[in-house]
Amino acid sequence: MKVAVITGASRGIGFGIAGSLAAKGYQVVGISRNIEPGEPFALTIKADVSELSSHASVLSQIAAKFGRIDVLVNNAGVAPLKRVDILESGAESFDRLININLRGPFFFTQVITNYMLDCMSRVDECKPSVVFITSMSAVTSSPERPEYCISKAGLSMAAMLYADRLASSGISVYEIRPGVINTDMTAAVKDKYDQKIASGLIPEGRWGQPEDIGRAVAALASGEIPYSTGAVIELSGGMNIRHL
């Protein structure tokens, strides 16, 4: 049975991804600071991926139960506690987002992909993949939340670097850039984006849902889009379209 590991899995996009991968037959390992056992998870681990000292313990729990990892989804991430103009933003918020959104996932991927390489040498039909969930903010300016944009831009480069390094070893790496997704993270700006969507911000005319991201991850993880390592897929309802 194939095993998928998802960080930030307790709610929102992470939970949507978990449901989609479970529906594809994966044993899903959910990792989060506040996660509780239950469907669609085969194993839940309470851990903060930004704490590098937790990585070895997380891996040992997964390895002891399943003996393999087929998919890693780096989804854990946070928004600034407060939106502040770039001319007034502070180091505390910057460091917090870099640690959670970039530093933690970068080193967690290092630990997991080394284990994946070992799995490939001893487990039949093990063709692992890694998916980084970034954001359209990786390439879109929001001067009132600069630390978020910078952390996601850095994570986008991390995805490219891992894709380059691991391609020859048979591990595919992808980046998914969600747009405006209906989650707890965007709840505080719901009215703002309702108005923007009504005014034509998103060509498809609706909020994205966690399940939209989940279906895309499941397709990539299942090998339904071959010959595509390093691909960047923006799921934003067409916000990436430049038009007059």
Image (cartoon, grey):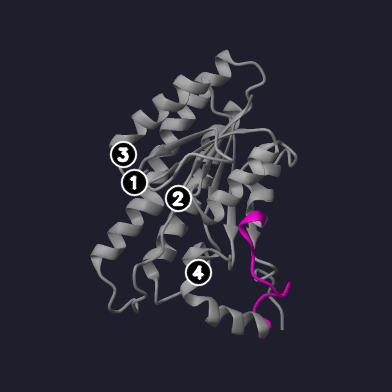
Give the quadrant of residue 127.
Answer: top right
- Magenta residues, start to end: 199-211
Instruction: For marks 4 and 2, give the CA distance.
Output: 15 Å
- Most extreme residue toward the front is 38
State whether residue 33 is above or below residue 201.
above
Give the quadrant of residue 172.
Answer: top right
Instruction: For marks 3 and 4, give the CA distance.
Output: 28 Å
Q: Earlier in the sequence, mark 1 or mark 4?
A: 1
Describe the element under mark 2 as helix, strand or loop.
Answer: loop
**The C terminus lies in quadrant:** bottom right
In this figure, which residue is indicated by the disc labeled 2?
76
Marks 3 and 4: which is nearer the front?
4
Describe the element under mark 3 as helix, strand or loop.
Answer: helix
Q: Earlier in the sequence, mark 4 or mark 2?
A: 2
Instruction: For marks 3 and 2, give the CA distance.
Output: 14 Å
- Where residue 82 appears, as percent x and y from the top left, is 34, 73
Indicate the amino acid at tag 2.
Answer: Ala
Instruction: Residue at 71%, 75% (x, y): give it.
Output: 205
Instruction: Residue at 55%, 49% (x, y): give it.
Output: 15
In this figure, which residue is indicated by the disc labeled 1?
50
- Where residue 66 appears, as percent x and y from the top left, is 52, 22
Tell me whether circle 1 and circle 3 mark residues in contact (CB < 8 Å).
yes
User: Toward the viewer: 235 or 138?
Assistant: 235
In this figure, which residue is indicated by the disc labeled 3?
52
One can see residue 117 in this view: yes
Instruction: For marks 2 and 1, give the CA distance.
Output: 9 Å
Q: Main secondary structure of the magenta part?
A: loop
